[in-house]
Each structure stands twice: as structure tokens, then as C-alpha cells.
Image (spheres, rainbow, N blue to C red):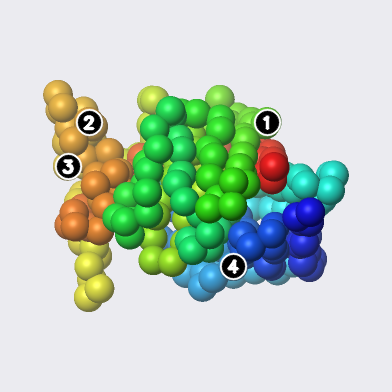
Amino acid sequence: MKKLQAEIINNRLITGQYGDIRFGPWSFECSDRYSFVTLSDQCRNTRQVGDHWQLAEGDWALDYQTSRIDPATLRIRTTLSARRDGLLQDAVIRLIFDKPTIQTGEIAGRKYHHTDSDRYRLYPVRTVRLMGTDGTIISVTLDRYDGAGRFAPYMYLRDRGDHWIIHARLLPIAPVDHVWLRWANRFFTLSAPDWLAHLVWNFPGGKAVFWRLRERLGRRCPEIQAVPLNRLKSSQSLMLEVTCRFA
């Protein structure tokens, strides 16, 4: 009989296993135009003091909890609260699963094999599934969320390197406060002026073409895309609650 094993340290899942399926680390991420927060990798242009994070365009308090709620289920709950008015492009719960023992992934009624496409298959859905080679079904569900009236829930399924990556994600909704139109490569990042970014975004078809273009098309697409940001006022919060079930 398969058993769920999970190493949880400081409310973060570091590594886990269910039968032959290995997973972890799981994490939280958020970003503005100049800063990036992650609990499992390298942050960029941030300052952390305990649960408080200072970014270039905002100061935030993060509450992140991981728990095992039954023998085959894990839950992550996170709340990000604005300590002053600030901009965000997203808030994310990130789950990683090792590739070798996962046969297919499923989102929005479509099944995918791992081809290292690095595509963000992003949909306004509440469930993503992974099917193991041993018949295991992993169901990741976004059970609860609060976007403070400025962000809406999405999930994505991504096949990159030796992993499957699932995000439960809050993204800005219209009317957006800022649009970041950028082209990035390993040497530099070029950002369009705000007036030009908004002009492109509001031009007929502009949003449909450039909205998270690189993410949608994968690694073969140039690193160019338009990313909207919305402002949260001081004391407003974003909340995500995700459950991962193994069966």
C-alpha cells in the first residue's frame, strides 16, 4: 500500500513521496516589475525581515502554512497583505513534481505529455491533475481564494526540464493599473515606456497578442510579453488555499 511521506519544515514542504512519485519543494511566489519573491529559490531585489517582505513597488506581510490534513492529502494556505499601497503582477502557490513517474498532465479537459515545452498552459480553472505511471491520480485544487476585487484565479500546468510544475495563481483583472511591456534575454531587459505599453495593450488585438506571450508559447518564443499589474491598498490582502490529493 502506498503511503504519503512529506518533510515539512517551517511550514514549507521541502520534499515528499507517494509510492514512486517524488515531489517538492513547494513554494509561494509574487512579483512586481522589479522584484521577485520565492520561498524555494533565489529572490531578486527584495529585503526580508521575518514574514515581512520589502519589494521595489510595495511592502508585504506573508503568512504561509503547509499541513497534512489526512493520510493522503496536503494543504497550503497563504495570505499576502499590503503594509502600504503597492503593485503586484501575481501571487502564486507553486507545486513541483518529478517527471519520471508521471505519465500525463491534465488541465481544462486536455491531456498533455511531457515534452519540455516550457509552456504555461494557463486557464481560469480550479483543478489540475497528474496521472502517474503506476495509476496514481494527483488532484491539485484551488479550494478558496480572495483577490480583493482586483485579481482573479487561474491555474497552469507546465512541463519544464525534469519536472511538472503546477501554479495556483492570482492575476490582475481589468481595469488594470499598469502594463509592463518588456523584452528580456540573458544579457538585459528592455521595458517600453508606460504610455507605449498602455497604447499597445488598449489597441484592438494588442492584449490578445502580447498578454503573457512568452509564457503561452513556450521556450521557442522570444522573451517578449505584456504583463499587467494592479494596485492593492494598505491593509488589503490576497489569499490562496490549495489542496493536493493522492489516490
- Secondary structure of residue under mark 4: loop
Q: CA distance from mark 1 to mark 3?
A: 36 Å
Q: CA distance from mark 2 to mark 4?
A: 32 Å
Task: Give the residue at mark 2.
Answer: 208
Residue for point 78% across, 47% down:
72
Question: Please, what is the three-letter code of the amino acid marked with disc 2?
Answer: Ala
Q: Are marks 3 and 2 in contact (CB under 8 Å)?
A: no
Indicate which disc, 1 or 3, sits on the residue closer to the N terminus: 1
Q: Is residue 167 left or right of residue 15?
A: left
Task: Give the residue at mark 3.
Answer: 196
Task: Give the residue at mark 4.
Answer: 40
Classify 46 as above or below 107.
below
Question: Please, what is the three-letter code of the amino acid marked with disc 4?
Answer: Ser
**Taking the image as drawn, is residue 159 in sight?**
yes
Residue for point 69% across, 45% down:
246
Q: Is residue 234 left or right of residue 73?
A: left
Of tags 3 and 2, the one toward the viewer is: 2
Residue 105 percent across, percent down from the top left: 46, 44
Instruction: Pick whichever, 245 or 151, lies toward us.
Output: 245
Classify 116 as above or below 70.
below
Residue 220 percent across, percent down from the top left: 19, 57
Indicate which disc, 1 or 2, sits on the residue closer to the N terminus: 1
Q: Are marks 4 and 3 in contact (CB under 8 Å)?
A: no
Question: Please, what is the three-letter code of the amino acid marked with disc 3?
Answer: Leu
- Secondary structure of residue under mark 3: helix
Residue for point 18% across, 54% down:
221
Q: Which mark is residue 144?
A: 1
Indicate which disc, 4 or 1, sits on the residue closer to the N terminus: 4
Residue 120 percent across, percent down from the top left: 36, 47
Of tags 4 and 3, the one toward the viewer is: 4
